[in-house]
Image (cartoon, rainbow, N blue to C red):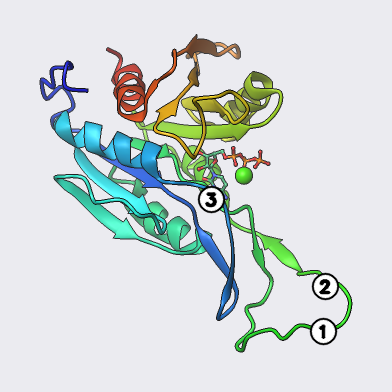
Amino acid sequence: LNAVEFDHDMEGKKVMVSAGPTEEPLDPVRIITNHSSGKMGYALARVAAKRGAKVTLVSGPVNLETPLNVERVNITTANDMYEEITKRAGDQDIIIMAAAVADYTPETVAENKIKKKEGGMSIPLKRTHDILKTLGENKKDGQFICGFSMETENLLENSSAKLEKKNADMICANSLTVPGAGYKVDTNIITLIKKVEGSDKPVMRELPLMSKDEAAFEILSEIIGR
Ligand code: CTP
Ligand code: CA
């Protein structure tokens, strides 16, 4: 991203980004989690900070270095992420949910390691809080709420539905089925689906294949209207 001039066009903006997976414990040795490298969220935090924003990064367990000039808050479970994000949300100008948050968590966490028995087993799960939906429902005046959407089918249709349902301002839709996109690689192919004030039809803008840093730059530019 060296070719891009950072002219501090996000100076004075408070930005909170979530990144990485959550881990839901089942017992002291087992978790339920999602695939997520955290790279897209970290790229957003890094690029926003380079553009002069005051950035808070709420991160699940990932193997990445904290970007320069970013305040990082580590969390493990979806509930931890919900707590850390909701308590800081009122202060933010822009919130971007790039984390792969678990939709379900075990109803109970066993105190001791669960021993195997004959036959199969099933695990009772309960829903976690939908953080993005909570943010959308409590949106402050002038605040911009952005989510991500990962799908394996009906990408644009399902992602547009999320924009509506969660009262978000933009959804960055990622297909998992095209080469060059997804959680494993350093590149992404994203379609930005943005709400239009006073219309129920969003605008869509498909970004070409690009690095996650470049995608972060484009996403932030779209948000600040440049
Ligand atoms: N998200 C969230 N809290 C959750 C689950 C998801 O804030 N408990 C956020 C994600 O960070 C992402 C957006 O919601 O920004 C969409 O996540 P996704 O998993 O694609 O959609 P869901 O609404 O969870 O629906 P489903 O998994 O059934 O497709
Ligand atoms: Ca989900």
Residue lying at the far right in this picture: please name it.
119
Residue sitting at 27 percent across and 39 percent down?
45
Q: Residue 128 sits in which quadrant?
A: bottom right
Instruction: Give the side of residue 57 with respect to residue 75, left or right.
Output: left
Instruction: Give the side of residue 69 with respect to residue 194, left or right.
Output: left
Q: CA distance from mark 1 to mark 2?
A: 9 Å
Q: Nearer the viewer, residue 152 or 101?
A: 152
Local crowd size for mark 2, using a 10 Å CA cut-off: few (<14), some (14–19), many (≥20):
few
Residue sitting at 36 percent across and 23 percent down?
215
Local crowd size for mark 1, using a 10 Å CA cut-off: few (<14), some (14–19), many (≥20):
few
Q: Which is closer to the viewer, label 3 or label 1?
A: 1
Earlier in the chain: of badge 3 and badge 1, it is: 3
Say which residue label 1 marks: 117
Local crowd size for mark 3, using a 10 Å CA cut-off: few (<14), some (14–19), many (≥20):
many
Tag 2: amino acid: Met
Tag 1: amino acid: Lys
Q: For disc 3, does the CB lie below 8 Å from ligand 1? A: yes
Residue 89 x, y percent position in the rendering: 36, 47
**Disc number at residue 101?**
3
Say which residue label 2 marks: 121
Classify mark 3: helix, strand or loop. Answer: loop
Instruction: Give the side of residue 70 with respect to residue 76, left or right.
Output: left
Q: On the rendering, which quadrant does ligand 2 occupy?
A: top right
